[in-house]
Amino acid sequence: MALTPSNPFPLGKIAPEFSLYDVVTRKTLNLHQIKGDKGTVVVFICNHCPFVIHINPMLVNIANQYQDKGIAFIAISSNDVENYPQDGPEQMQQVAKDLSYPFPYLYDDTQEVAKAYDAACTPDFYVFDADLKSTYHGQMDNSRPGNEIPVTGKDLIHAMDAVLNDQQPLESQKPSIGCNIKWK
C-alpha cells in the first residue's frame, strides 16, 4: 500500500467539464447535469483501495447529509481495469449498490478526467462552489487505515460548510493521502 499525496489544485480554478458513464444508472452524465445548486464535491475513488474502503461509510453518511443542503457528490474511478479488474464497471456497480452510494459513480475509462483534475490518489477530494470554482482540495480528515484516528470527515465538512456559508476557502488544506491512481 503505497502512500501517495494529492497534487496541488489551484483555488478558484473552474472544475474541468466531463461526460462519463455512470455504472449505477448506466447513463452518460456530464458535470453540469449533476452539479449541486450550492456546491459540488468531486472525489476520485476506486473499489479496492484500503484508504477508500476505510472512509466509505462516512463518505456515504456525509453525502446523504449534504446533498439535502444543495451539495452534490460525484465519485469517479479512473483506475486501469486491465491490470486492476476489481475496479471495472461491473464491480463498481456492485460496490455502489452494496454501500448504497447516494451519488453517481462514474467510470473514467480514458483517464482523461483524472488528468484534467490532476488527480493522484484515491481518495482525492475536490470541493467547488455553486459556480464550479475550486474552494478546497485535500483530505477528508486525518484518519488512515491503522492509525486509530476515527473517521469524522472533519476537513471535508469544514470545506463544504464554508461554501454553504459563503465564506472564504479554508486556509489550511492538507493533501489527501491514499493509493496512487493506477495509470495505463
Image (spheres, rainbow, N blue to C red):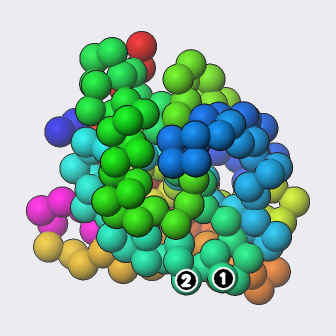
Classify 167 as above or below 145: below
- Crowding around mark 2 (Cα neighbors within 10 Å: few <14, some 14 to 19, many 20+) is few
Q: CA distance from mark 1 to mark 2?
A: 6 Å
For the N terminus, the quadrant is top left
User: Is residue 141 in view?
Assistant: no
Q: Are marks 1 and 2 in contact (CB under 8 Å)?
A: yes
Residue 148 on image: x %, y %: 14, 73
The correct choice, above or below, for 59 with respect to 82 in the image is: below
Image: magenta residue range: 141-147
* Residue 154 percent coordinates (x, y): 45, 79
What's the residue at 53%, 23% (across, down)?
Answer: 109
Give the amino acid type for the residue marked by disc 1 in the picture.
Asp
Q: Is residue 8 left or right of residue 116?
A: left
Q: Secondary structure at mark 2?
A: helix
Mark 1 — residue? 68
Residue at 78%, 38% (x, y): give it.
Answer: 17
* Residue found 28% across the figure and 25% down from its top: 85
Judging by the rendered image, the residue that carries numbered circle 2 is 65
Q: How many marks?
A: 2
Q: Residue 128 lies in what quarter of the image? A: bottom right
Q: Quadrant of the C terminus?
A: top left
